[in-house]
Image: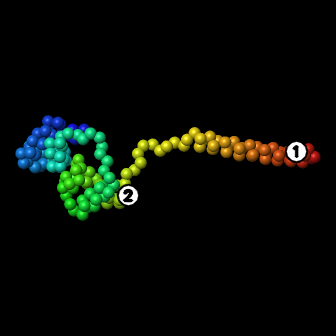
C-alpha cells in the first residue's frame, strides 16, 4: 500500500474490485465517497499492474538513462503515459509524467543519474600536508621578522 494515499486499504481493495467490474475512476470515487485524485492514481496503476497496484514494490528500481530519455521524448510527442508505462514495465504512469516534466524543464541532463551520498572528506594526509606547509611558511616569516628586528636594533641604539 502507498503510505501517502488518502484511501484506506479497504477502499483501495473495493476500488480495484470495481475497476475489474468495468467501472471508471470517476464513478468509483463517487461510489466510495472519496476524492477523485487518489482513485485516479490507483486506476492508472491498476491499468498498468492489475491487482499488483495494491502491493507496494520492494525497493526503488533504477532505470537506465537511455530508457528515461526515450520514454520522456515519446510522452512529450503525445503518446499516453499509461501505454508507455505498460510498454516499458514501469510501476506507475506518474513516473512517465515526471520524466517528461524533467526533460522539458532541464533537458536530457536532468535525467542523468547523479552521485548519491556524502562527498568524500579530504583525507588526513591532505590535511597534514596543508598544516606542514603552513608551519613552514610561518617559520620563514618568523625568521624574516627576526632578521629585520636585528637590522633595526643598531639604528634604534644609535639615537
Quickly name the residue at label 1.
153
Would you say the residues marked 2 and 1 are in contact, meaning their CB atoms lie under 8 Å apart? no
* Residue 73 higher or lower than 38, as above or below: below
Closer to viewer: mark 2 or mark 1: 2
Q: Secondary structure at mark 2?
A: helix
**For residue 9, side relative to residue 121 (left or right):** left
For the point 49% across and 43% down, which residue is it? 120
For the point 23% across and 53% down, which residue is it? 88
Front residue (pair 17, 48): 48
**For residue 1, side relative to residue 101 (left or right):** left
Q: Position of residue 50 (x, y in %)?
A: 15, 45
Q: Residues within 10 Å of mark 1 (few under 14, many from 20)?
A: few
Query: Which colouring convention does the figure follow?
Result: rainbow
Q: Position of residue 102 (x, y in %)?
A: 32, 56
**For residue 153, side relative to residue 65 (left or right):** right
Q: Secondary structure at mark 1?
A: helix
Q: Quadrant of residue 13?
A: top left
Q: Quadrant of residue 112?
A: bottom left
Which residue in the rendered view is the most extreme toward the left? Answer: 21
Q: Residues within 10 Å of mark 2 (few under 14, many from 20)?
A: few
| N-term-proximal mark, 2 vs 1 | 2
Quickly name the residue at label 2.
109
Disc 2 and disc 1: Cα gap in Å?
66 Å
* Residue 76 higher or lower than 134, as above or below: below
**For residue 123, side relative to residue 135 (left or right):** left
For the point 12% across and 48% down, which residue is it? 25
For the point 18% across and 55% down, which residue is it? 83
Which residue in the rendered view is the most extreme toward the bottom? Answer: 77
**Residue 37, can we see it?**
no
The quadrant in which the N terminus is found is top left
Q: Position of residue 44 (x, y in %)?
A: 17, 49
**Residue 59, can we see it?**
yes
Amino acid at each position: 500500500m502507498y503510505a501517502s494515499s488518502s484511501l484506506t486499504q479497504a477502499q483501495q481493495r473495493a476500488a480495484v474490485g470495481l475497476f475489474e467490474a468495468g467501472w471508471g475512476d470517476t464513478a468509483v470515487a463517487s461510489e466510495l465517497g472519496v476524492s477523485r485524485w487518489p482513485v485516479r492514481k490507483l486506476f492508472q496503476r491498476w491499468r498498468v499492474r492489475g491487482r499488483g497496484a495494491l502491493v507496494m514494490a520492494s525497493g526503488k528500481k533504477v532505470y537506465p538513462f537511455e530508457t528515461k530519455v526515450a520514454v520522456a521524448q515519446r510522452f512529450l510527442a503525445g503518446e499516453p503515459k499509461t501505454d508507455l508505462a505498460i510498454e516499458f514495465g514501469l510501476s506507475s504512469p506518474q513516473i512517465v509524467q515526471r520524466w517528461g516534466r524533467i526533460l522539458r524543464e532541464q533537458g536530457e541532463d536532468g535525467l542523468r543519474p547523479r552521485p548519491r551520498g556524502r562527498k568524500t572528506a579530504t583525507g588526513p594526509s591532505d590535511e597534514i600536508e596543508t598544516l606542514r606547509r603552513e608551519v613552514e611558511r610561518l617559520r620563514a616569516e618568523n625568521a624574516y621578522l627576526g632578521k629585520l628586528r636585528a637590522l633595526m636594533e643598531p639604528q634604534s641604539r644609535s639615537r
